[in-house]
Image (tube, coloured by chain):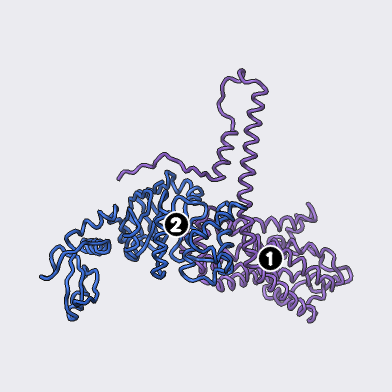
Amino acid sequence: MDVICQGLTKIYPDGKEALLDLDLHIQEGLFGLLGPNGAGKTTLMEILTLLLEPTRGQVWIDGCDIRKHPDQIRSQVGYLPQFFGFFPELKAVEFLEYLGGLRGLRGRELKRHVNELLAQVRLGGVAHKRLKTFSGGMLRRVGIAQALLGHPKLIIVDEPTAGLDPEERVHFRNLLFELGQGRVVILSTHIVKDVEETCNQLALLHEGRLRFQGSPTAFIRAVQGKTWEFFGSHDEVEHFASRPNLVSICEKMNGICFRVVSPTPPRDNARPVMPNLEDAYVHFLETVRQAA
Amino acid sequence: MGLEPPERRIQNRTVMEIMMDGIQHAAEKPYAPAAREGRFRRFRRRWNNTSRLIQNGVQAAWWEAGYWIKLFLYTTRRILHVEVALSLAGAFVFFGWVVSRNLADNPRDLLYYCYLYFSVVTILLTMSLLPRERDEDTLEILWSQPIRRSSLIVIQLLTITFWQWVLCTAVVFFFSQYAAYTEGRWWIVPLVVTSSFAIGAVTVLISTFTRHSMAAGLVALLIFGIHFYWLQQLGPVQIFYHTLPAAPPALRGGPPRPETAVSLLSIHTLIFSTVSSALSYVFGKISPCMPLILNRFFVLALVGFVLDYLFRRLRRTAEWFT
């Protein structure tokens, strides 16, 4: 199972270029899609789920051209949109049975599958409660359950952990990791830590263009020896806060700790630290902006 | 990068593809010399091909029927309480008012108001059919399912129409008990129902052009209001076609339609009545039912045109719901 995009371009009727000549090869496992707002992540996912038609370019999912075999592709794709719409008057089990029915599942097989999915997302106890009574985290879990209906080979989740509490987020990440075994899971998020902890491949999009594709290790390697931490005073906060290469500021026992990505030490007392995905993300975006 | 599409195929093929395989398999292929193939073997081959084709067709129909039923049941669940409330409560108030004000001293007119009433109900139900799904973000989920988008809309419209049929039958049955003259009353039910379907299709189309469902409803009410009152002189080329006998012999001669509305457009009336008379004359010569048949063909054509345009529009401008 793999996804191949070649020369993928999407230009909206108002002239906005959401994607430009995107070449992407996604293999089995968890694939993280990173990028700032307006980078084209959601557009890419809507094209992969056939909600949007690309202006140019081609996409193959498991060897099938999405333009030629849309019905086949839809049956292979599970999608959890950023704004997950649900039918408030339905119970969780009814909602999944309804969507399962649209996916061609029937009778006992459908009921068994729905029960399995509800247990998998830890909603077995509230299966017969109406969706309007569910919390945000529970609704996201219903969303992921509906994306798993019919055992799709490609699962696309857009900002799945947004608005979840830390415990829910950890559980969700683990669930996504489980799902990534034997299929492609595309995870689009602003939360870099989620990608760092779960994905074995990632891509960085910026203004509709692909800026990086590879493993998180390779992504991080680019900022090896360029990540610094130093302690400063409260007066320096304003000075460093405006810098684009600043990753974080936090108050520690020794004072204010600044984390900066820079080819040279930003201050004399700065010490090199092990970079993480967030450092690499800031560095890449800054490099792209400077190049632009 | 020069990426080439892999030659692999998805294992879980759709029913449509299985069916197409069956059709291709069943098609005549260049074959080995016919003399080698005995009559029995040829018959068996054809029998196998035909049975496979039928089997695939049944399989496809079964698969389609499965989600059609799901959509029907869900739509029913979503709209039925509103539809029943609007239709029955409103019908009692509306027809009660019509009867009490002696606006329908001709029984034909009493039943004819079914058109007006059920059209309003249809518009109220269909104006938010797509906008509501779009606003609640459920359209994205539904359209990412492996079903035809056209089915989603058609089945929802059919569901509304089905319940219109049930409720219209109930209303006609109930109110015609208060009319002295009820000849041909059941004709009104299929006419109202098919017209409702057409009105629903047009309203759904309008709702894809407007940001709010309320605007779609108002535009649809305006269009069909004008159509109801002023374009009836067109004869068969209209949605609200009237087949009931004008009146029983004793009542003939009464004013058939609102005269104020007609007098506002006297020139149009002249033209329309001329066209109507000409059409009625031509088709009346062929068969007395011909105007009715022609009218329903017109409604069918209108529905076909509207739905075709709607589906093309939804495919072309899918951005509108994202």
Mark 1 lies on a secondary structure that is helix
Q: Which mark is residue B271?
A: 1
Mark 2 lies on a secondary structure that is loop
Q: Is residue A292 visible?
A: no
Look at the picture and state if A234 lies above or below A5. Answer: below
Residue in view at x 45 percent, y 66 percent: A83
Q: Is residue B155 visible?
A: yes
Task: Tally the marks.
Answer: 2
User: Mark 2 or 1, which is nearer the eye?
Assistant: 2
- Side of B280 relative to B15 (left or right): right
Residue B135 position, x and y percent, is: 51, 69
- Side of A166 relative to A105 (left or right): left
Q: Color of chain A here? A: blue
Q: CA distance from mark 2 to mark 1?
A: 48 Å
Residue in view at x 64 percent, y 52 percent: B65
Chain letter matching colour purple? B
Amino acid tagged 2: Leu
Look at the picture and state if B153 lies above or below A268. Answer: above
Label 1 near label 2: C-beta < 8 Å?
A: no
Residue B274 position, x and y percent, is: 72, 63
**How many residues crowd mark 1 within 10 Å: few (<14), some (14–19), many (20+)?**
some
Which chain contains the residue that carries disc 1? Answer: B
**Quadrant housing residue B194:** bottom right
Which chain contains the residue that carries disc 2? Answer: A
Residue A35 position, x and y percent, is: 32, 62
Q: Which mark is residue A52?
A: 2
